[in-house]
Amino acid sequence: MGFWKKKKKKIQTEEIEETEKKPGWFRRLWRKFRNIDWKNPVNRWRALFIGLFASIAIAGTAYGAISATNNPQFCSFCHEMGPEFVTFKESAHSEIQCVECHVDPGIVNEVVHKMESMKEVYYHIVGPPDPIVQTVAVPNNNCLQCHSENRLVTATGDLIVNHDGHIKEDIPCITCHSGVAHAKVVERGLNTQKNLDYWTKENADKLVKADYMRPNMGTCIDCHDKVNNGERPWTDIQYSLPENNHGKKEENDQEAAKDGHAEASTLETASLTAEEQKAHDNKLSQDIILQAIGKQKKDVKISMDCFTCHKEVSVPKNHDLNQWNQKHGDFAVKDLNECLDCHNDAKWIRKVEKQDIVTLIEAGATKPKYVPNITVVKEDSRESNFCRTCHGERPPGHMDSDAWLTAHAPKAKTNEQKAECYVCHDRTKPEEGAKITAPTDVYCEYCHRTGFKDEKKKK
């Protein structure tokens, strides 16, 4: 009898378990918490200890995550950040963290930045922009944490730069110092997806040159020229940032044109071909060069004269020779590299030309030694905006074309004299489709089809 009673009780228990579901762990935990006797001081101390431990754990985890992601090495984990990381390690800022430049000071700003940076994780998964372009300017406050705004002379002691005056005009530091950490890889076209594999420590000295990290004189010249024309270009932060070609520039230009706010220069050059755009840029550069060397006089707010900014650099003594305009070619052939120290286009023009990363790596880190060569000088003088500023115009000594046709022979007797002619004139007719860099389309063999007299005598 007892056996059956026990069996019946077991069946009843199973029926109760089936009708009542077992509460989940969260509900059980809540019930335990609700049933705690908070009047008991022991329970209150336990709760305080648990809360304190949880706070420390959360704060420690957050601090560790922030510290880990602040480390520049963290950026190198993403393949697409290779150019930025390699250039940063080669820069003068390699001992500080990325956030010290790119994030406003303060823990709140840093936390907000971390939250906003989650989009970088999204881009890493779906594919980053090609190329990656800086769209947020480094604020002056970050620079002034380490650098004084009262500096007047640069570290070399040569350049006179009134930093305080620039800051009072609200000119961003990166307007001049845009390449200080990343060697202008965007402007040079070296951080595209196809180039990422070349950005290694072994190639760093070939790709990261000091010329691209220091302020470029062309930037100063361009800004000063705009000020002289009544502009304040730095008020548009895009002037200080790399050009962004991810569709935004065209959209902004179109919107500006619709609203009637587009600059005339922007609308005028919008429909130019690549060749016409280059000719337009060259003309602007040559106008600036003429002004800087004193051959184009006009009312200016900021002088373009060299000694306005330079303390030690001076005009070389050989430039004071009589008839320097006629004799400077001989000096150029003798030591072209010395001429290019001042007359290199890269020093006069703000815009950095696109480069081929493979060519840079193959060329190596050392600059090849110049061997006197009239052909090299001729090609450089034709390509250089500084040289073309004068050589692109017909020399006054050439007289009228019909008179010069019979009068130029005594001026081109020797090989040295002919070499001067070849600076502007090609000897033979350029091949069809060849790139023509000569300032004139008149070539020697147009008339001298059978060669020159002195060459015939030798035969």
Image (cartoon, grey):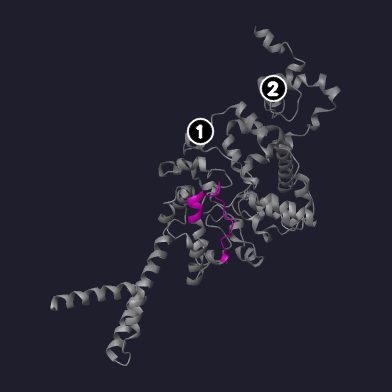
Q: Decide: is 446 above or below 143.
A: above
Label 2 SS: helix
For the point 68% across and 61% down, the residue is 235
The part of the image, by quadrant, that contains residue 384 is top right
For the point 74% across and 13% down, the residue is 449
Residue 202 seen in render: yes
Q: Decide: is 178 above or below 433.
A: below
- Looking at the rendered image, the quarter that the C terminus falls into is top right
Q: Say whether residue 353 is left or right of residue 14.
A: right
Is 454 in front, or is 177? 177
The part of the image, by quadrant, that contains residue 54 is bottom left
Give x and y (percent) for residue 253: 73, 52
Residue beneath label 2, please?
Answer: 418
Give x and y (percent) for residue 194: 51, 40
Give x and y (percent) for residue 152: 59, 62
Q: Disc 1 marks which amino acid? A: Lys
Q: CA distance from mark 1 to mark 2?
A: 26 Å
What span is colored magenta in the figure? 121-140
Is 420 in front, or is 316? 420
Image disc number at residue 369: 1
Q: Is residue 322 magenta?
A: no
Give x and y (percent) for residue 317: 63, 42
Q: Disc 2 marks which amino acid? A: Lys
Q: Residue furthest bottom?
A: 39
Is 366 in front, or is 316? 366
Q: How many marks?
A: 2
Q: Decide: is 140 above or below 254.
A: below
For the residues carrying marks 1 and 2, which lies nearer the camera in this image? 1
Is 175 in front, or is 372? 175
Residue 181 seen in render: no
